[in-house]
Image (cartoon, rainbow, N blue to C red):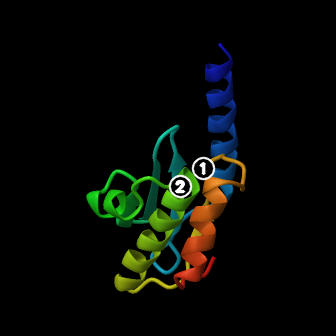
Amino acid sequence: MAASRGKSKRVIRHQRVRQKISGTSGRPRFSVYRSLNNIYVQVIDDELGNTIASASSLEEEIRSRVQGTGKKNVSSVVGELAATRTKQKGVQTVVFDRGGYKFHGRVKAVADAAREAGLEF
C-alpha cells in the first residue's frame, strides 16, 4: 500500500512541475525518469511533440562501460551521453525536469554529468 501512495505523490509533484515547465525548440525539456533499477533521460520539444535525444541505462553502450559499478555512476554516464547527443543535435540550453523526484542521488548525478558535458540549465 505504501508503494502506491508514494508513486501517486510523485505523480502529483510531477504534474505540478509540468504546469510550470515546458520545452521549446530553442530550449527543450531535459526529462528524467528513474525506476528502481534503471534511469532514462529524454530531451523533448513540447511544442512539436518531438524527442530530440534520449539515453537510458538499458543501452548496450552504457552497460558495457559501467558493468559492476553503482547506480550513481550509471546515472552519471547516462547524463553525459544524453548531453553529448543533445549537443550533436545543436541544442546548448535545456530546461531540467526532475520528474517529481527529489534533486539528490541519481537525479542529481544525471544533472551534474550533463552540466559537465556542456549543457546549460
Residue type pointed to by label 1: Gly
Tell me if mark 2 has few (under 14), some (14-19) or many (20+) residues whose alpha carbon lies within 10 angstroms of its own: many
Q: In this view, does 39 lie above or below 95?
A: above
Nearest the viewer among 23 and 95 is 95
Tell me if mark 1 has few (under 14), some (14-19) or many (20+) residues whose alpha carbon lies within 10 angstroms of its own: many
- Provide residue 78's location: percent of width, then percent of height: 45, 63
- Provide residue 120's location: percent of width, then percent of height: 60, 82
Residue type pointed to by label 2: Val
Kindly check if marks 2 and 1 are in contact, taking CB atoms under 8 A apart as contact. Answer: yes
| Separation of marks 2 and 1 at Cα, in angstroms | 6 Å
Q: Which residue is drawn at 53% across and 65% down?
A: 76
Nearest the viewer among 30 and 23 is 30
Nearest the viewer among 47 and 31 is 31
Q: Is residue 90 above or below residue 27?
A: below
* 16 relative position to 97: left or right: right
- On the question of residue 18 being in view, the answer is yes
Residue identified by numbered label 2: 32
Q: Which residue is drawn at 51% across and 40% down?
A: 35
Residue identified by numbered label 1: 99
- Image quarter of the C terminus: bottom right
Q: In this view, does 37 lie above or below 69?
A: above
Q: Which residue is drawn at 34% across and 56% down?
A: 63
- Provide residue 112's location: percent of width, then percent of height: 63, 71
Quick one: which residue is furthest to the front in this view?
A: 68
Image quadrant in which you'd find residue 15: top right
Query: Circle 2 — which element?
Result: strand
- Image quarter of the N terminus: top right
